[in-house]
Amino acid sequence: MGKIFITGLTVNTLIGVYDWERTQQTALLLDVTLTADLNAAMQSDDVNDTIDYAKVAECIVDVGQRSEFELLEAFGNAVMTSVFDAFAVSAITVKIVKPNILPNAQTVAVELCRERS
Ligand SMILES: Nc1nc2c(c(=O)[nH]1)N=C([C@H](O)[C@@H](O)CO)CN2
């Protein structure tokens, strides 16, 4: 097993509870940790034998373009479901950061995790 990290991935999406948040997309920042068997790629040096992090990033950006959730939790659930459906990962952790949304905080964030059963 090994881990692949994507940090600070910008994902534009319509998200928020309040009407003023739903008139335009918000830029979220995602940190994603994928657990997967990386042994084949360690031996072969071939991207086809691993989880291509570029394709995972594309998949997540696409979820953002297609969704319009109210809560970070629901958006994170959709991200985890899409990644699990498309890639052979055994576990995923997603931290979703929403910057500049509270007047007295730099960021808010939710972290979610899922293991394949
Ligand atoms: N646990 C959460 N709390 C809140 C969320 C959220 O997504 N998860 N969202 C909001 C609003 O949309 C916020 O961005 C502005 O107040 C409030 N609380």
Image (cartoon, rainbow, N blue to C red):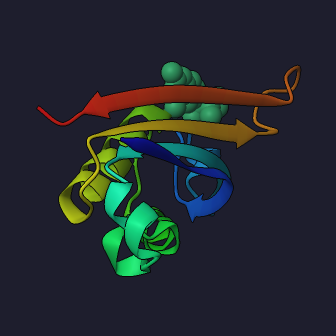
Viewer-proximal residue, 96 or 47? 47
- At 41% from the left and 56% from the top, the residue drawn is 68
- At 50% from the left and 68% from the top, the residue drawn is 61
Viewer-proximal residue, 47 or 76? 47
Q: Could you say which quadrant of the image residue 10 lies in?
A: bottom right
Name the quarter where the N terminus is drawn.
Answer: top left
Q: Is residue 3 above or below residue 63?
A: above
Residue 32 location in percent, x, y? 53, 45
Residue 65 location in percent, x, y? 46, 70
Q: Is residue 101 above or below residue 36?
A: above
Tell me which image quadrant ligand 1 sits in.
top right
Farthest-out residue, top: 104
Name the quarter where the C terminus is drawn.
Answer: top left
Image check: 37 left or right of 11?
left
Residue 101 location in percent, x, y? 75, 36
Q: Is residue 86 above or below residue 39?
A: below
Judge whether residue 17 can be spotted in this image.
Answer: no
- At 50% from the left and 66% from the top, the residue drawn is 53
Viewer-proximal residue, 94 or 100? 94
Q: Could you say which quadrant of the image residue 51 lies in?
A: bottom left
Image check: 66 left or right of 81?
right
Judge whether residue 46 can be spotted in this image.
Answer: yes
Image check: 18 left or right of 103?
left
Q: Is residue 70 above or below residue 78?
A: above
Image check: 114 left or right of 68?
left
Q: Could you say which quadrant of the image residue 113 lies in?
A: top left
**Disc count in the image?**
0
